[in-house]
Amino acid sequence: MKDKIKNVKSLEELQKMYSDTFGKNGTMTAKLKNMAGLSNEERSIINAENAELRQLFKEKQNELEMVALNAKLATEYVDVTLDVEPQNRGTFHPLTQSLKEIGSVLESLGFTMWVGPEIEDDWHNFTALNTPEYHPARDMQDSFFLENGNVMRTQTSSIQIRAMEKVGVPIKMFGVGRTYRKEWDATHAPMFGQIEGLYIDKNVTITDLVATMRALLSKFFERDIQLRIRPSYFPFTEPSIEMDMKWGDRWLEICGAGMVHPNVLKNCNINPNEYQGFAFGFGWDRMAMLKYNLNDIRPIYDGDIRWLKNNGF
């Protein structure tokens, strides 16, 4: 048996011999089953034979596998002159790309980026922003309130309050982060990214606000942007305006803005008789929708790679 194992020429032949020896009906299997009536010496001989045969089979298998590998290496080779297979290294998500571009433009205009907590207290999210207790923005239908009275940040304006409290004036900053409201349709999401700018100094006017927004939008969309201003109302600005931009043959609402309300300045220990400034805010996901010609905001948050690839990302 030992000589037969040593003389085997192929793995297939070795496998058949192994099955004939150690398989269900194999010769060694039969010997092991019938050891009950044998003496200790006879059992010892059979166990030694079993171990030796298994070792021989293992060594012969390793030998034949090495022979097969060497034969394969002798006939196959890698052509190092061929071009490498293309690799998909991925790209920035449209929201990330939009944020990077908008942030870069604002920084070039002298604004500094700030971030803040997503779970806010009543003071920073409402009261300091001149939002009275009876204001509908506090309604449970619009805001996500927590049991301890805090709220999921409804606007990044709260970052402006924290910035003014920390560094005072003059200040030129923009806040970036996620905000949360009970909305969900093709153009609104319950969680969305928002950017809000703030510029407070002694001689800041609404003309500076319009010029800033025109420069930001023109650089981001890489075209000259026409703006239209409409009167509006926000509790934290006075006067308040809505800005529309010309997009093809339509006017599209792009952001809310205005001059910071004197009460907001007072809440941050800033003298409104000495300082004034403007604030603006918009969703950068909506900016991404316009720039990349997307009709529905919801797939942006789904994380479906197929959708991203189909839309060129």
Image (cartoon, rainbow, N blue to C red):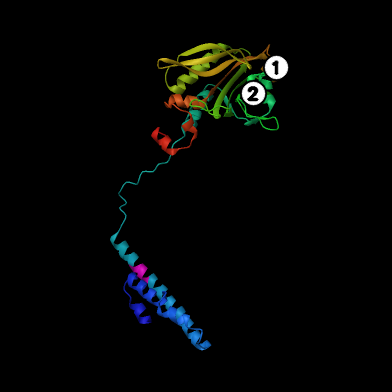
Amino acid type at image mark 2: Asp
Magenta region:
63-67
**Is residue 64 shown in magenta?**
yes
Q: Return the residue at label 1.
A: 266
Residue at the disc numbered 2:
139
Kind of residue sitting beneath label 1: Lys
Q: Is residue 201 visible?
A: no
Q: Main secondary structure of the magenta part?
A: helix
Quadrant including the C terminus? top left
Front residue of this view, candidates 210 and 241: 241
Quarter of the image holding residue 181? top right
- Left or right position of 201 against 85: right
Calculate the distance from the C-alpha at mark 1 to the C-alpha at mark 2: 25 Å
x, y percentage for residue 266? 70, 17
User: In the rendered structure, which disc, 1 or 2, sits on the residue that comes first in sequence?
Assistant: 2
Q: Is residue 61 visible?
A: yes
